Image (spheres, rainbow, N blue to C red):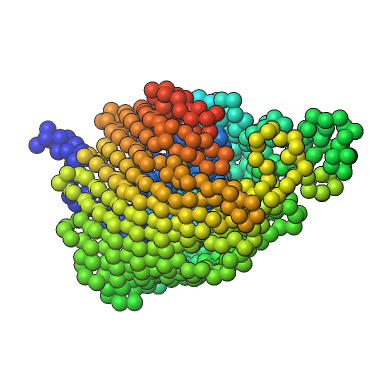
Amino acid sequence: MCGLAPAVSLAAETYLTEEDLLAEIPLVITASRLSQTPARAPASVTVIDREMIEASTALDIPDLLRLAPGFQVTYPNGNITSVTYHGNEDAWSNRMQVLVDGRSVYSPLFSIVDWTHLDVDIDDIERIEVIRGPNAPVYGSNAFLSTINIITRQPFQDRGLTARAAKGSLDTRAAMLRYAGSHGDLDYRVTASYRGDDGFEGVNDEKSLSSVSVRAVYDVTPNDDVDVQAGLTRGPEGAWGQSPVTSPERDKDTRSFFVYSRWRHTLSATSDIHVQAYTNYLDWSDTYRIGPLSALFGVDPALIPLLFGQPDQILSLSRYDGTVRREDIEIQHTLAPGADWRLVWGASYRRDTLESLQILGTPEPRGDSIRRLFANVEWTARDSLTVNAGAMLEDNGIIGTHASPRLAANYEWFSNQTVRAVATRASRSPSIYENYEFNAVRFGDGTVLDIQFISDQSIRAETIDSYEIGYRALFPEADLELDLKIFREHMDDIITHPRDLTYSDPISPFLPAGQETGSFVRVNDGYVDTSGAEIQLMYRPARHSLLSFQYAYADADGRIIRLIEGDRPVRYNERIDAATPAHTVSVLSSHTFDNGFQASLAFFFLDATDWGGDGDDLPSYRRWDAKLLKKFLLGGLESSIGVLVQNLLDEGYAEFQKENIFERRTYLQLGVRM
């Protein structure tokens, strides 16, 4: 029996039972703000858990989102990331809500998520909950197409000192140092990190960023706990010089910080209340000088006063320049008003402020106040049927009051097999940037030389009507989880920026023949209909093995205006199908061997995509990644060494623009924990 004991122990460690699989089903909170299994959630949910994160070939957080069906990740340059769901986006993807522990990191500066300034290290993440579909009834306007909630690890999960370093292609340098400890009822974690690289070859997109973050969780009483977090990131980034004349290569200084606190009070086994407040700050400083005018236009300096009524001069410009602040306070109450009912409701107040002379055309900051009231009720009609109904009512100073409702039903027709039907209507309000932009080139005395971007302040909210049928199944006998979804979405009143020929400018005579003139005007004009299907398959044959497969098919049709003359449309972009990739695939396989080796292999495929804005129409690509990691004890310390290769076959492909060639990249990774 002593001889059999190790074999029995190994078998128990290696093979999963039905109880193991059922016990490991995660509870998600992002779909409705109620803790639910994915089978009962009123939306399609993908959970990228800690095991997948450690097995993945991702170096940064956005790359992890390739493991969610229907998501595309692209790099307009080395320090700007665009994450989209169902494509149809440009460098500034703005229809997605991204949260860190429930705190929104969406920024009114260019209406973006600045993925390099999340103030979160990838090693501090416990899981990422991805809601694949509109979630505005739960998290408001920016949860228009999807919601990503990055949930960080509790400090007690990583007690001790941890260090990590990486070095590799593109002169990549990365390091992380973390200490987590406790004192009585207080658990805390401090993480400092650095990351830098040279970006794409031939593109001014390097970065050199230092970050520090702190989290402290204090159990005040058995029924009360306080969670306090703060973070800071700063450093220079290449400013993506697009023209040696008007946008030369240079660096922009960047910095961000946040402070977040949440108090949670347990009222009973089925009821609790929490209050959270946070402030976010992001600053991009990018002012540079060009000229003189005579050199820009290639004319005699004496002609400048005759042409422009201004002396020959140097111009001071700024492109990626601005400061934004967000203050938010929210109260939420969860309760069970009946044996078969659960309810979550709450309210919040948010103040956004944007300050940018270049973007707004005024040194005075622009602000917007957003008031929100939300609720979601879950009714267990019977053991096999769950109904969720929810809505968000929002009011702001740009478009007034608008509502986003959702109704969903989940029916378990066989054991561990659930069918889901969801109908959602969501609205996305224009941001401060979209509503008030007046981006122009000015002479030294403030006189406008050329209007580049301007907003129509009668702009309306975008809307989307979304319908989906889903099927989610767990097959314990096959160690398999399956999620299927078919959907149809109609997006209307799309906020776009066609060129308006009625805006004449004095530089037109100097432009090459045939080049369009006029300013870009932000208006509502366009619609997109998207239908398709998604599948996610998760196979875990043993505790230390996994295979995940994600596939999405999307068929888009619609029309978005591209050229106007006053109120008269001149040209539409009717190739909306090209802006939405028809096929998106990702595969991740990983196994950890008994000798401490972990091997991972990943595959990604993205169909041909016509990226908007400054992007190009690019062909499809295939990419293979591989990682080999060895864990061992060194002087009693838990250590690891690994090699990561992205684009293993070195089939170079373009990201977003033809100039951004993604070639084979190799990295050496080291880690130690004590």
Can residue 459 be seen in the rendering of this structure? yes
Q: Residue at x 67, y 52 (%)?
A: 454
Q: Nearer the viewer, residue 328 or 216?
A: 328
Q: Residue at x 37, y 41 (%)?
A: 582
Residue 277: percent from left, percent from top? 55, 62
Q: Nearer the viewer, residue 498 or 661?
A: 498
The answer to which image quadrant residue 634 occupies is top left
Looking at the image, residue 199 sits to the left or right of residue 665; the answer is right
Q: Residue at x 66, y 48 (%)?
A: 501
Quadrant into which the N terminus falls? top left
Q: Nearer the viewer, residue 157 or 278?
A: 278
Quadrant into which the C terminus falls? top left
Looking at the image, residue 182 sits to the left or right of residue 290; the answer is left
Residue 394: percent from left, percent from top? 52, 68
Q: Nearer the viewer, residue 549 or 26?
A: 549
Residue 267: percent from left, percent from top? 40, 72
Residue furthest to the top in view is: 650
Looking at the image, residue 474 sits to the left or right of residue 305; the answer is left
Can residue 270 be seen in the rendering of this structure? no
Residue 80: percent from left, percent from top? 56, 39
